[in-house]
Image (spheres, grey):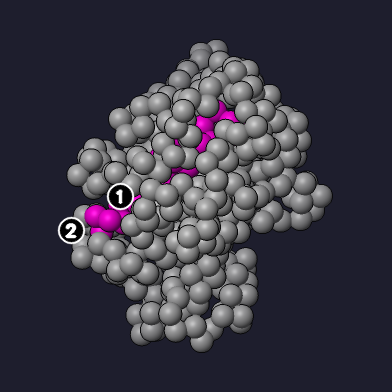
């Protein structure tokens, strides 16, 4: 039997840009733009600035390394990846895969470092992005809720594999080196839930991508990682899910069994990467559909706040117990609160949307200038958990005071849009960026044309405010 890591390595090494379906290329451009916008926003956050200060204080003066985006300082490759990931995370404009992982916050920083190091073309960069997302999401897929139920945070635990694979592909590592990269990521994967539950802040994808850069460097130097580190008796899945036989503690749809064979089934033909969605509002991903779907329903039927008696939303059960039913830190089906699902549903009714630049710190609504009708109606929203609903696919029913009711069923795919729609919607962040509108338009144009760019790292320079060095 060929090991899982070997199968993934063989696929990644053999993949070329010409093998990528147009939809995959389009999504790779889109997630690049989305995460660059988040880096720009996050560069102004306290946590983002602290990350940059930490790295520059320790590593400034490096001559051969990589660039911290926005800031422009050259530091070590791992340091740049960490700082860029922290800015991406705290910018709040994350992409999301199956609710609890945000691949781009680690994959983009890792891919950018590799592209700068290798002088990679846009096509090479896009191929690396596709590899990173596909491998990470296949490894995570069915296992995310079970990993969370064991006290690990699936975001950084799986988040190390994406940037490592993207960088390995961009740097043109051999099959043996890619296989070892995956194995070394198993040694370095980490992430825990208890800190945030006890008043702290989680160390997340920033640490994952820094470790990913270490794994790639070690593999390049010839360190062998092992062959069955994913599926072996003492391997990754045994450690993080409690077994290597596909048994699940929790799942999004109620299944208790999957198969490790599914990880590589249809590889290169069925692209899980296309399930990646854009979290356009800076809140928990499961809230975003409550804004847009509710807004669409009310627009279609000309329903106004004054007309509404109450609202019901039937949602996937795991969306009501974050981060895991085993260790819930908040219940969305409980009392209404600012920043909760009921609040965002109310915004959809009353405002037909939510400000894109609000609440850049993840999931926390600041409560400033909330319309009084939003704060009133959220107490008349009921959240109903269901094991049959798709992720990010609530069924919204608005009951009006005249005794009528109106329902709209979300598909869960409303935020899996193409590059043109991403470019249209992400432009709403322009007033909050540290660079000019014209410079951001250059970023959009460069992402759109990445497959024709001689050097992908031109994107780094475009994040640095004009007049600064990059």
* Magenta stretch in the rendered image: 122-145
Residue 376, by quadrant, is top right
* Dominant secondary structure (helix, strand or loop) of the stretch shown in magenta: helix
Q: Is residue 300 magenta?
A: no
Q: Position of residue 293 (x, y in %)?
A: 45, 30
208 on left or right of 323: left
Local SS, label 2: helix
Indicate whether 201 appears above or below 53. above
At a point 79% along the width and 53% down the height, the residue shown is 199
Report if residue 243 is visible in the image.
yes
330 on left or right of 399: right
Q: Position of residue 408 (x, y in %)?
A: 45, 21
Residue matched to label 2: 452
Report if residue 146 is visible in the image.
no
Residue 434, by quadrant, is bottom left
25 on left or right of 231: left
Residue matched to label 1: 127
Q: CA distance from mark 1 to mark 2?
A: 13 Å
Give the quarter of the figure containing the C terminus: bottom left
Q: Position of residue 346 (x, y in %)?
A: 57, 35
At a point 51% along the width and 13% down the height, the residue shown is 404
Which of 163/297 is in front?
163
Local SS, label 1: helix
Q: Is residue 144 magenta?
A: yes
Indicate whether 324 appears above or below 182. above
Which of 26/109 is in front?
109
Which dot, 1 or 2, sits closer to the camera?
Answer: 1
């Amino acid at each position: 039997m060929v090991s899982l890591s070997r199968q993934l390595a063989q696929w990644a090494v053999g993949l070329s840009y010409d093998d990528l379906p147009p939809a995959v290329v389009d999504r790779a451009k889109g997630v690049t733009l989305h995460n660059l916008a988040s880096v720009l926003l996050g560069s102004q956050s306290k946590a983002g600035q602290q990350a940059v200060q930490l790295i520059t204080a320790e590593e400034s003066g490096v001559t051969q390394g990589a660039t911290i985006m926005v800031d422009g300082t050259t530091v070590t490759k791992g340091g740049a990846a960490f700082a860029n990931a922290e800015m991406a995370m705290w910018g709040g404009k994350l992409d999301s895969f199956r609710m609890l992982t945000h691949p781009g916050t680690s994959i983009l920083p890792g891919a950018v470092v590799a592209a700068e190091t290798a002088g990679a073309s846009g096509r090479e960069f896009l191929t690396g992005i596709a590899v990173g997302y596909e491998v990470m999401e296949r490894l995570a897929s069915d296992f995310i809720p079970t990993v969370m139920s064991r006290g690990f945070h699936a975001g950084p635990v799986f988040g190390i594999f994406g940037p490592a694979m993207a960088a390995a592909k961009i740097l043109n590592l051999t099959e043996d080196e890619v296989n070892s990269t995956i194995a070394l990521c198993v040694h370095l994967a980490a992430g825990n839930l208890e800190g945030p539950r006890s008043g702290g802040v989680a160390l997340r994808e920033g640490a994952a991508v820094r470790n990913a850069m270490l794994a790639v460097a070690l593999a390049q130097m010839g360190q062998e990682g092992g062959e069955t580190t994913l599926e072996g008796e003492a391997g990754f899945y045994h450690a993080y899910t409690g077994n290597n036989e596909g048994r699940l503690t929790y799942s999004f749809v109620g299944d208790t069994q999957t198969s490790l064979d599914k990880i590589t089934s249809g590889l290169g033909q069925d692209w899980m990467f296309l399930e990646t969605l854009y979290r356009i509002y800076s809140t928990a991903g499961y809230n975003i559909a409550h804004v847009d779907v509710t807004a669409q329903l009310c627009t279609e039927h000309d329903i106004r706040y004054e007309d509404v008696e109450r609202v019901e939303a039937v949602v996937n059960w795991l969306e009501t117990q974050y981060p895991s039913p085993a260790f819930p830190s908040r219940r969305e089906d409980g009392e209404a609160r600012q920043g909760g699902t009921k609040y965002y549903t109310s915004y959809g009714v009353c405002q037909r949307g939510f400000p894109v630049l609000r609440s850049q710190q993840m999931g926390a609504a600041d409560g400033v200038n909330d319309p009084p009708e939003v704060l009133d109606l959220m107490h008349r929203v009921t959240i109903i958990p269901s094991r049959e609903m798709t992720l990010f696919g609530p069924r919204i029913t608005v009951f009006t005071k005249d005794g009528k009711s109106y329902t709209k069923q979300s598909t869960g795919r409303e935020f899996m849009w193409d590059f043109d729609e991403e470019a249209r919607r992400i432009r709403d962040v322009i007033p909050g960026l540290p660079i000019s509108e014209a410079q951001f338009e250059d970023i959009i144009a460069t992402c759109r044309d990445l497959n024709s760019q001689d050097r992908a790292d031109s994107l780094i320079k475009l994040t640095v405010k004009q007049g600064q060095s990059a």
